[in-house]
Image (tube, rainbow, N blue to C red):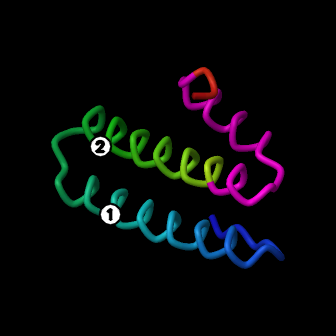
Amino acid sequence: MIVEHPNRTHAAACLAAEGTRQQEVAAAITAGGGNATVAAAVRTAEIKFYRALRDSAIANGQQSAQFYQALRDLGTGGA
């Protein structure tokens, strides 16, 4: 997912988080270990990604509700 935003600082943080997410997902797939293991590693990468987006949005005075919802959808309760 690419997040485009007029706030350049937030946009840069989102881009960096996306790069990290992609690397972690690729590493999880490469490492293998069965479907459950890969799925857990991908979920962890997704949680880290949405936390980074949420934290950047808050730090830059931007809307963050959608990131809390994504985290709830991933089972973190929004945290």
Residue drawn at x 55%, y 45% as measured from the top left:
51
Q: Which amino acid does label 1 sit on?
A: Ala
Q: Name the residue under label 1.
A: 26
Looking at the image, residue 13 lies above or below residue 54: below
Asked which quadrant contains residue 3, the reply is bottom right
Residue drawn at x 39%, y 40% as measured from the top left:
44
Numbered marks: total: 2
| Secondary structure mostly seen in the magenta stretch | helix
Q: Element type at marker 1?
A: helix
Asked which quadrant contains residue 9, the reply is bottom right
Looking at the image, residue 6 lies above or below residue 58: below
Q: Does the magenta stretch include residue 4?
A: no
Q: Which amino acid does label 2 sit on?
A: Val
Residue span colored magenta: 56-76
Residue drawn at x 69%, y 35% as measured from the top left:
68
Q: In whole angstroms, how far apart are the C-alphas of marks 1 and 2?
A: 10 Å
Q: Are marks 1 and 2 in contact (CB under 8 Å)?
A: no
Q: Mark 2 points at which residue?
A: 38
Expressed as whole percent of the image width and height from the top left, the position of residue 4 reads 75, 73
Crowding near the residue tagged with mark 2, few <14, some 14–19, many ≥20 C-alpha atoms within 10 Å: some
- Residue 43 horizontal side relative to residue 63, left or right: left
Expressed as whole percent of the image width and height from the top left, the position of residue 8 reads 73, 78
